[in-house]
């Protein structure tokens, strides 16, 4: 395996004293776990924040070997992690993607949709500008994984209806792709739901 491509950071785990294992979503190669030397150091730790877009070069000697990655920051979403609602949304969609997508299986539509949702979270003036897009990403993810879910799209100005759809899609996620890991990953969604619920209709 050897490629260079834009990648979205979905997760980063400490490995050893200074390295990290990053889970990167790419359009053509899917979700790829890769060893990043110095990933916990001062220079790369801010780069490997979930939600960031990177220019990643990934290579390994064999298909069974954990690849090595060299990464450069293309777009930082770290400033929005200081805001509770955008931080919860970014944390949820990246954790969901890292938890349920199979390794090295391309989902170009999901890559584009996730990039669009992350961008919307960062540029929209409020959650009303991105909440529906986030739910649509979840529905697309369910469908791409083979779990069809029929959801009626709420009116853009009906916040209560959108929250009802959000809750319904959440139950589908917990029942199917997150059934074995519901407690760990769904905690991020629960936090996001609590914060969305504080927005008045």
Image (spheres, helix red, strand yellow):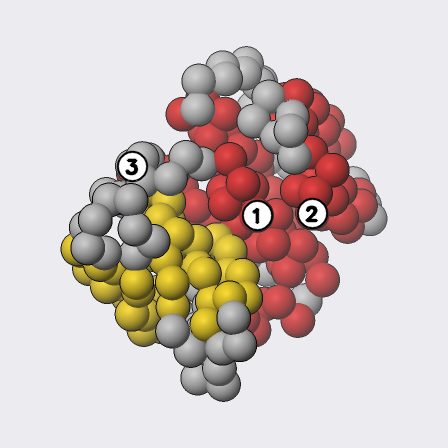
Above or below 147: residue 6: below
Is residue 48 at all visible to an observer of this figure?
yes
Q: Which badge, 1 or 3, comes first in the chain's sequence?
A: 1
Q: 121 and 142: which one is in front?
A: 142
Residue picked out by circle 1:
95
Locate residue 179, reporting x and y percent. Answer: 65, 26
Asked which secondary structure carries label 2, the reply is helix
| Whole-number angstrom distance, CA of label 1 to CA of label 3 | 18 Å
Q: Residue at x 57, y 48 (%)?
A: 95
User: In the rendered structure, are the residues bearing label 2 and label 1 in contact, judged by CB atoms less than 8 Å apart?
Assistant: yes
Q: Residue at x 39, y 52 (%)?
A: 33
User: In the rendered structure, are the residues bearing label 2 and label 3 in contact, judged by CB atoms less than 8 Å apart?
Assistant: no
Above or below 185: residue 121: below
Q: Which badge, 2 or 1, comes first in the chain's sequence?
A: 1
Quadrant hosting residue 14? bottom right
Locate residue 184, reporting x and y percent. Answer: 70, 43
Locate residue 10, reporting x and y percent. Answer: 48, 53
Asked which secondary structure carries label 1, the reply is helix
Q: 94 and 195: which one is in front?
A: 94
Residue picked out by circle 3:
106
| Whole-number angstrom distance, CA of label 2 to CA of label 3 | 25 Å
Above or below 181: residue 49: below
């Amino acid at each position: 395996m050897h490629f260079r491509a834009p990648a979205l950071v979905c997760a980063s785990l400490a490995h050893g004293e200074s390295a990290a294992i990053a889970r990167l979503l790419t359009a053509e190669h899917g979700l790829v776990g890769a060893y990043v030397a110095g990933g916990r150091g001062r220079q790369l730790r801010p780069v490997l924040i979930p939600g960031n877009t990177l220019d990643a070069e990934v290579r390994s000697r064999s298909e069974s070997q954990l690849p090595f990655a060299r990464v450069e920051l293309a777009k930082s979403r770290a400033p929005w992690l200081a805001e509770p609602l955008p931080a919860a949304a970014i944390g949820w969609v990246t954790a969901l993607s890292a938890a349920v997508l199979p390794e090295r299986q391309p989902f170009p539509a999901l890559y584009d949709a996730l990039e669009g949702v992350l961008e919307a979270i960062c540029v929209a003036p409020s959650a009303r500008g991105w909440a529906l897009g986030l739910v649509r990403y979840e529905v697309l993810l369910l469908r791409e994984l083979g779990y069809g879910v029929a959801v009626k799209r709420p009116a853009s100005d009906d916040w209560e209806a959108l929250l009802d759809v959000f809750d319904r899609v959440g139950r589908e996620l917990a029942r199917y792709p997150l059934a074995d890991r519901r407690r760990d990953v769904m905690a991020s969604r629960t936090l996001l739901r609590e914060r969305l619920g504080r927005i008045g209709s």
